[in-house]
Amino acid sequence: MTRSPTSTPRKRLYTAQERARRDATRWTLVQGLLAPAQFAAFAVSLILVIRFLLTGHGYEAATISILVKTGFLYVIMITGAIWEKVVFGQYLFAPAFFWEDVFSFAVIALHTLYLWALFTGSMTPHQLMVVALAAYATYVVNAGQFIRKLRLARLDERAAA
């Protein structure tokens, strides 16, 4: 695809200083390890949740898997906020990741709703699993946002080289 002469180039995701901080901090590695681990927990849990919804069996396994996935989510959110502080100078809502952070709160809200409903007994097992699926749908969108940013960062690095 060619760019028209009147179109403006996209703003780079990182300044040179931000990129240097990103590459120097251990939090980049932490995020790089946690993200695929969280995705693996999500994939296993999704199968268990769907299995329960289809068969009515495996409620305990599905519940444990949701708790594990939610634990990963909270850890990755906390460490991601630290990463953002190191790289961009603020814990959340840095301009480069503003919409990803906004959507992350929707993901966290749905996972937290699940936890609240589980521990208060305010929903049936079926309702809990539906909430988990809604939380997982938002997680998939949010993960897509971050994968897109990873791709943009790599394109920026190629353009800078």
Image (cartoon, rainbow, N blue to C red):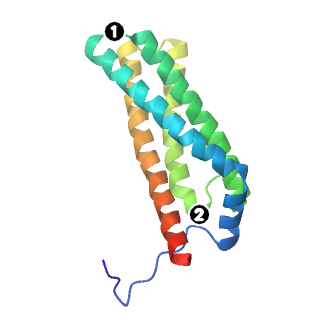
In this image, 112 relative to 62: left or right?
A: right
Residue 54 appears at what percent x and percent y? Answer: 26, 17
Q: Is residue 90 visible?
A: no
Residue drawn where x is 39% and y is 84% of the image: 7
Quadrant of the drawing holding the N terminus? bottom left
Q: Amino acid at mark 1?
A: His
Sort mark 2 into few (<14), some (14-19) or many (20+) by Cα contacts within 10 Å. Answer: few
Q: Residue furthest front?
A: 161
Q: Is residue 136 above or below residue 12?
A: above
Quadrant of the drawing holding the C terminus? bottom right
Would you name the residue on which mark 2 appears? 95
Most foreground residue, 86 or 113:
86
Sort mark 1 into few (<14), some (14-19) or many (20+) by Cα contacts within 10 Å. Answer: few
Q: Amino acid at mark 2?
A: Pro
Front disc: 2 or 1: 1
Most foreground residue, 12 or 25:
25
Local SS, label 2: helix
Would you name the residue on which mark 1 appears? 57
Residue drawn where x is 37% and y is 90% of the image: 5
Q: Is residue 8 above or below residue 135?
A: below
Residue drawn where x is 48% and y is 21% of the image: 65
Residue 128 appears at what percent x and percent y? Answer: 41, 19
Local SS, label 1: loop
> How much space separates mark 2 and mark 1, taking CA atoms?
45 Å
